[in-house]
Image: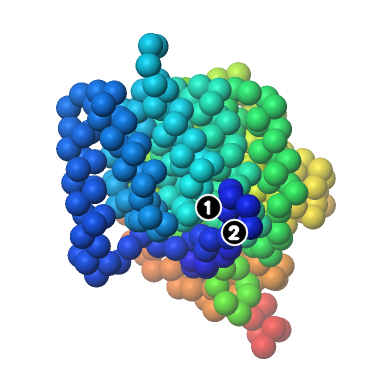
């Protein structure tokens, strides 16, 4: 859901509504002055943009009336804005046009920019080698956005659709420790509790069968998992929460170019999860359950600093340190980690399950079992639990199992959890 909220302008005594969508098709068709200016701007950007054309671009943008500058930024494609950021240069013996362009958007006219435009400017800055002034501009855009508008901006940056997410920006791309500290303090001081959770999940043997789980054909997306993510994201309130809070915390190693994360995202895209954020591991923590757990814990600690207005839930599996991470997170900040769900892919015994339960970690066999526990804890609605159950049953029947016995064993697990679900729903009626 998109809400219109008000953020203070960078200028004194004024404010502007932010969070507005890009202009409608009717507005686009009737805003001929903007059309003409965009056509001229694209002409200057075609081929090599010299300093004279850079000057004309700056003059056009500075002279744009209130509201028109934001329309222009909204209607430039993401790639065009990236190109424009790269075209504006600081000249060795001449004008510092890049600095002037960045200052125009991050300070002088910031109060006129919608949340979407602010996020797109940050994205364009992040795509290039960010110098000290570019890092300061990112800071200025965030610091010029407050309260609920800041939450919306952080979510917009985080949902960029590739590895250029908020964690990458703050903890990797920004080199200045002072600027990083300013950002994190601003995020903390401006945090307004949303009452919502960030849904954090492992990938292998949690989202799909990929490492240790031989109960399903390889690469099978687990029945009901996407429905479970969705219901946790919607929450348990009478009105569904804003969706888009799914984040994968993976042991797969991070690389500066984002190649490994690109492969992960391609897999998620193919399976219908196009808007999720991915937090990667590293080579130093790739081997050993304790090492994997430590890196996931570090990632979670960073994520908590980026989004202090949210709580967390975590879904993992019993094969690669996720239970260790979950137990540590609950012990460290039980009010922040609302629940930990661990998919049993290693045939855990009753005693092992109880030991983990004593640490605040719930072990489950099917996503109906996980959803039933989430309903017990007030994390999803009754209707949400029923939707997870329907999706799990439907998707299980579509799995191309290698044998009848394999299918029958999974169906038996599901029927047991469905019976438990009905008993819980009967008690809550």
Q: Residue at x 75, y 49 (%)?
A: 189
Q: Residue furthest top?
A: 93
Examine the image and state in which quarter residue 162 appears: top left
CB under 8 Å between discs 1 and 2: yes
Q: Residue at x 25, y 23 (%)?
A: 50
> The C terminus appears in which quarter of the rendering?
bottom right
Closer to the eye: label 1 or 2: 2
80 is higher (above) or lower (below) than 371:
above
Q: Residue 25: percent from the left, percent from the top?
A: 24, 66
Q: Residue 262: percent from the left, percent from the top?
A: 38, 34
Q: How many marks?
A: 2
Residue bearing mark 1: 111
Q: Residue 263: percent from the left, percent from the top?
A: 37, 34
**Would you say 316 lies left or right of 207 here?**
right
268, 9: nearer the viewer: 9
For the question of whether residue 128 can be seen, the reply is no
Q: Residue at x 54, y 41 (%)?
A: 107
167, 384: nearer the viewer: 167
325 is higher (above) or lower (below) than 91:
below
**How far is mark 1 from mark 2, CA to CA?**
8 Å
Q: Residues within 10 Å of mark 2 (few under 14, many from 20)?
A: few
230, 429: nearer the viewer: 230
For the question of whether residue 190 can be seen, the reply is yes
Mark 1 falls on what kind of element? helix
Numbered mark located on residue 14 in the image = 2
Mark 2 falls on what kind of element? loop
**Would you say 197 lies left or right of 153 here?**
right
The first of marks 1 and 2 along the sequence is 2
């Amino acid at each position: 859901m998109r809400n219109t909220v008000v953020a203070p302008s960078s200028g004194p005594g004024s404010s502007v509504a932010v969070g507005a969508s890009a202009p409608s098709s009717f507005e686009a068709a009737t805003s001929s002055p903007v059309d003409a200016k965009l056509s001229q701007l694209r002409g200057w950007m075609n081929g090599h943009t010299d300093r004279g054309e850079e000057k004309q671009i700056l003059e056009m943008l500075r002279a744009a009336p209130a509201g028109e500058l934001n329309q222009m930024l909204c209607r430039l494609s993401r790639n065009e804005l990236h190109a424009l950021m790269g075209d504006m240069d600081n000249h060795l013996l001449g004008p510092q046009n890049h600095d002037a362009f960045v200052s125009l958007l991050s300070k002088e006219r910031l109060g006129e920019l919608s949340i979407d435009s602010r996020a797109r400017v940050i994205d364009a800055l992040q795509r290039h080698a960010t110098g000290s002034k570019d890092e300061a501009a990112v800071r200025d855009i965030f610091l010029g956005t407050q309260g609920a508008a800041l939450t919306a901006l952080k979510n917009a940056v985080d949902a960029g659709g590739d590895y250029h997410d908020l964690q990458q920006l703050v903890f990797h791309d920004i080199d200045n420790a002072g600027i990083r500290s300013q950002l994190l303090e601003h995020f903390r001081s401006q945090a307004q509790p949303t009452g919502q959770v960030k849904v954090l999940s492992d990938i292998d043997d949690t989202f799909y069968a990929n490492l240790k789980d031989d109960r399903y054909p390889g690469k099978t997306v687990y029945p009901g998992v996407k429905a479970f993510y969705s219901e946790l994201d919607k929450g348990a309130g009478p009105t569904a929460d804003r969706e888009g809070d799914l984040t994968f915390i993976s042991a797969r190693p991070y690389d500066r170019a984002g190649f490994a994360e690109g492969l992960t995202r391609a897999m998620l895209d193919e399976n219908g999860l196009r808007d999720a954020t991915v937090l990667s591991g590293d080579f130093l923590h790739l081997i050993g359950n304790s090492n994997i757990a430590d890196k996931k814990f570090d990632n979670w600690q960073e994520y908590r600093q980026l989004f202090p207005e949210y709580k967390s839930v975590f879904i993992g599996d019993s094969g690669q340190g996720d239970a260790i991470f979950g137990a540590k997170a609950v012990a460290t900040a039980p009010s922040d980690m609302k629940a930990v769900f661990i998919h049993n892919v290693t045939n855990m015994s009753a005693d092992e399950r109880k030991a983990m339960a004593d640490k605040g970690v719930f072990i489950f066999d099917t996503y109906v079992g996980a959803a039933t526990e989430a309903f017990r804890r007030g994390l999803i609605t009754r209707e949400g639990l029923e939707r997870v159950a329907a999706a799990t049953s439907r998707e299980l029947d579509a799995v191309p199992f290698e044998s009848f016995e394999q299918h029958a064993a999974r169906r038996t697990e599901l029927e047991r959890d469905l019976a438990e679900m009905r008993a819980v729903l009967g008690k809550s009626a």
